[in-house]
Amino acid sequence: MRADVTDVDALRAVRADIEDDLGGLDGIVHAARLPDTGLSTGSRPAEATAELLPKVTGALALRAVFGDMPLDFVLLSSSVTALAGGLGRADDTAANAFLDAYARSPHGWRSPVLSVAWGAWREEGVPDHDGLAPDAAVRAACRVLAEGRTGSVAIGAYTVEAVAGHERRLAATTAATASTVTAADGDLQDTVARIWRDVLGVTEVGPHDDFFRLGGTSLVAAQLVLRIRQAVGARLSMRVLFDAPTVAAMAARIESLRAAPPAEAPIPRLRRPGRPG
């Protein structure tokens, strides 16, 4: 069945249909999220709201509708960013941190609630992508559910400490090198290729070389995308490396983003209650 997970009335209709057709419900996996919308530096209210709604409002709506049922489990799908941070991903980090905290709180469900802070999963069809194999992820999730765990747990191909260390190094490297490559250096494809060479540590990058075949991993993808964003001013998503994994394809995506209508105004300054201006 399809329904908006943030719509309580729609979820009530889903519950009624489930009870009529199946007689009951055994468990809930709350994995609603937006596709990756890009790094959130300079985030706008609409983007932050869109990122938070499916996870935060969705979890609360599910509790309002299904919270009284004696389920075997409620699994909330969070991310390791809630524990290790994520450069330029404050909106996503906040949404996942809420899920982890909610699972540890007196949430009011009659059922055990577990929030899983997932590390990166391998992308189907992407060669040499580092991350958790989907079948391994499913086995791990089944294991922690079978153990009756509640609260929050991290599952991934890397430890939380390793991911956090990578994020710290990424932030330091990006701050130190952000201004070394600019779009004024020449042709857009040349600019993108120079950043690829710098981040990947390779001497030659052709227009049709694949990011992953050059040794790119999910642990360097964020640095690459942020460097390109800073150089060319385009609001690239992390997803671009899977949809456009070559220099030529990425340059074409940047051109299409530049041609798109201008985005809404930045976040307005908020007035504190009781204070003028």
Image (spheres, helix red, strand yellow):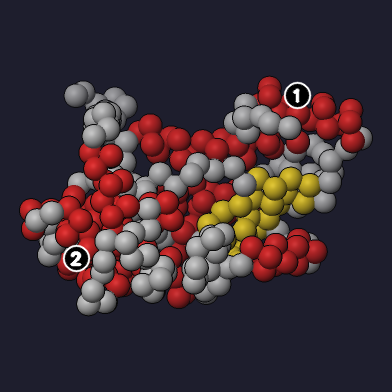
Which residue is at 21% across, 23% downward? 276
Residue 134 sits in which quadrant?
bottom right
- Residue 57: where, in percent of width, then height? 56, 35
**Is residue 172 something that shows in the picture?**
no
**Is residue 229 left or right of 57 when viewed as pictured?**
left
- Density class for disc 2 (Cα within 10 Å; few <14, some 14-19, many ≥20) is many
Q: Residue at x 8, y 58 (%)?
A: 185
Q: Which mark is residue 92?
A: none
Q: Measure how far apart labels 2 and 1 are at the Cα level.
A: 54 Å
- Image position of 123 (left or right of 234): right
Q: Looking at the rendered structure, which numbered label has been put on residue 194?
A: 2
Give amino acid for label 1. Answer: Ala
Q: Amino acid at mark 2?
A: Arg
Measuring from the top left, give residue 95's x and y in whole percent: 49, 46
Residue in front for this viewpoint, 60 or 46: 46
> In the displayed structure, would residue 57 be above or below residue 244?
above
In this rendering, the count of numbered labels is: 2
The x and y percentages for residue 81 are: 46, 59
Q: Secondary structure at mark 2?
A: helix
Give the left or right position of residue 230, taking residue 273 as reference.
left
The residue labelled by disc 1 is 13
Q: Residue at image x 37%, y 65%?
A: 210
Q: Is residue 166 above or below residue 65?
A: below
Q: Secondary structure at mark 1?
A: helix
Q: Residue at x 68, y 31 (%)?
A: 2
Image quarter hosting the N terminus: top right
